[in-house]
Image (cartoon, rainbow, N blue to C red):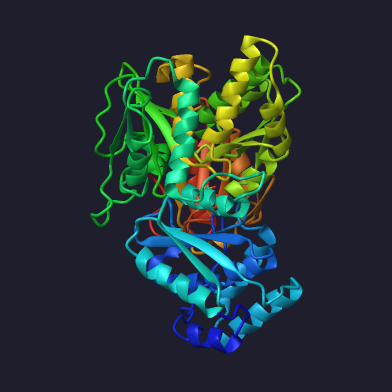
Amino acid sequence: MSTTIDYGKIKQFAARYPKPNGVSFSYGTAGFRTKAELLDSVIFRVGILGALRSKKLDSKTIGVMITASHNPEEDNGVKLVDPYGEMLEQKWEIYATQLANAHNADVLVNVIKDIVTVNDIDPTKESTVVYARDTRPSGVRLVEALEHGLKAVNANLVNFGIKTTPQLHYVTRCYNTLGTEASYGEPTEEGYYKKLAIAYRKIVEGLPRLPKIKVDAANGVGAPKLRELAKFIDEDILDVEVINDDIDTRGKLNFQCGADFVKTQQRVPLGLVLPAEQRAASLDGDADRIVYYYNDSDGTFKLLDGDKIASLAAGFIMELIKASGLEEINVGVVQTAYANGSSTNYLTKVLGVPVSCVSTGVKHLHHEAEKYDVGVYFEANGHGTVLFSPSSQARIRKAEGKTPENISALEKLRALIDLINQTVGDALSDLLLVEAILTYRRWTPKQWDQAYTDLPNRLVKVVVSNRHIFKTTDAERKLLEPKGLQEKIDLLVQQYKDGRSFVRPSGTEDVVRVYAEAATRHGCDELAFKVAGLVYDEAGGIGGRPTEFL
Ligand code: G16
């Protein structure tokens, strides 16, 4: 088969995927995301871009994931994954947006030609794309659109089937490192489970098993995949029960369940009975986020979100590094504006670890975390992981340790390097990470929670006629536009003790997000809804004014 680009063939295929009129697409926080019925042409074009990226990167395998993660079932989305499992290089996001918005086949071909010329791409190079989808019904049709895009440019297709998003990131890195010193693992689903299971055993072996954990899988792909993973881990070291596992009934995905629901509603998901002081966790629709929680003895719901996971992981890793004798390895934590003020305080003042704040979106956190020897990054919503730099990995693997304490800590650090999916935040890998730390520390969720007390916080969505008029600065903590709105928010914030609030346009939903925190629950809720009302009144709110609280 010819590997070169045949523009006539692209035009023929493209005729089947006309761009819908009156819609403008943009490659956002996690790729393209909108109503599934609008996405066929976008995904066809993403196929073409994936192949171009592969050609540009000397025929490395590029990943494509079809998912809308935490969004409702009628939505879908797509994102490209670079060779080592990272998010697509930002410069190429612009090409994705240009391709998606080309209004006919001629314009599309011209955009492709420009990308080829500007990037000096050799059109005759081979290209390979590995792709997967979550359990959304629209995924079947959209995979076909992707395959047509790939065939239009004579790419090699590797269909990885139904997978979690992090599994697709994992396999992409495995393909590109196979047979090299940096080999990331076997490029199969089974290889993924084995790698995690072996590493988990190394950390918890010989320690008393924790009581059963119930995991809400959001009625998404995490349900069958967590069950598969559990098959590779003996019951004597992990007791897990999967709930909200119905991936066949329409409308159930993420409905009143899943990590996003639990985080934003601050209550247990539908279908979960949770006795006091027992821990449970929720995944999101594509299993790249996880949050933990429990009910206190008086019935109060307690959330252990991404900030709590980051604190738990950073504290554990810092302790191991000290015990290993490799104290020169530095650890840093990366958060976003959504991080609870108490968590940042705890990390900097109690753990004494440097903390950076970046814009929402894994791509931003991941790059910042790469600046440390060990970079722990988590968004409050439960999306995160830990990166061990190549040099810190080499030092940990090479060190022999002088004392039994050194040796034991080094063994655990080596196991952590394998346990943690370093390509992207991964709910299944993060679940095992938290379970391993809690087992090691013999902690109940309440003991874990005692590190610090969250300031009451609230997240509200406001629907506006055009969210793109919102422009932010200072890692999204301040609004530049609409002009004058930030000053009005500041005036409201000043009225609340420990008050903080910011407004930013979502990159995955057609809404503006309002975050607020304050010293009291009442103050925080009032502040959140006052700011939301302000946004609604001053920046083109549509539908109902957010008034749940006032
Ligand atoms: C995606 C991104 C996350 C982000 C979330 C919400 O998560 O990967 O980094 O925090 O969207 O983003 P926004 O507030 O811009 O809508 P997921 O789990 O939906 O892929």
Quarter of the C terminus within the rendering:
top left
Please, which residue is most extreme toward the front here?
179
Q: Is residue 37 left or right of residue 492?
A: left
Quarter of the N terminus within the rendering:
bottom right
- Looking at this view, is 115 or 544 the one in front? 115
- Residue appearing at x 52%, y 25% in the figure: 519
Q: Is residue 441 left or right of residue 339?
A: left
- Residue appearing at x 68%, y 24% in the figure: 353
Q: Report x, y in % for residue 14.
A: 50, 83
In the rendered image of this protein, does residue 54 appear above or below residue 258?
below
Q: How many marks?
A: 0
In the rendered image of this protein, does residue 419 appear above or below residue 18?
above
Q: Report x, y in % for residue 139.
A: 38, 63
Q: Report x, y in % for residue 473.
A: 68, 49
Q: Report x, y in % for residue 529.
A: 46, 42
- Residue appearing at x 30%, y 47% in the figure: 219
Q: Is residue 265 visible?
A: no
- Looking at this view, is 241 or 449 the one in front? 241
Q: Is residue 256 visible?
A: yes
- Residue appearing at x 41%, y 43% in the figure: 260
Q: Which of the 4 quarters of the picture holds residue 228?
A: top left
- Looking at this view, is 203 or 398 the one in front? 398
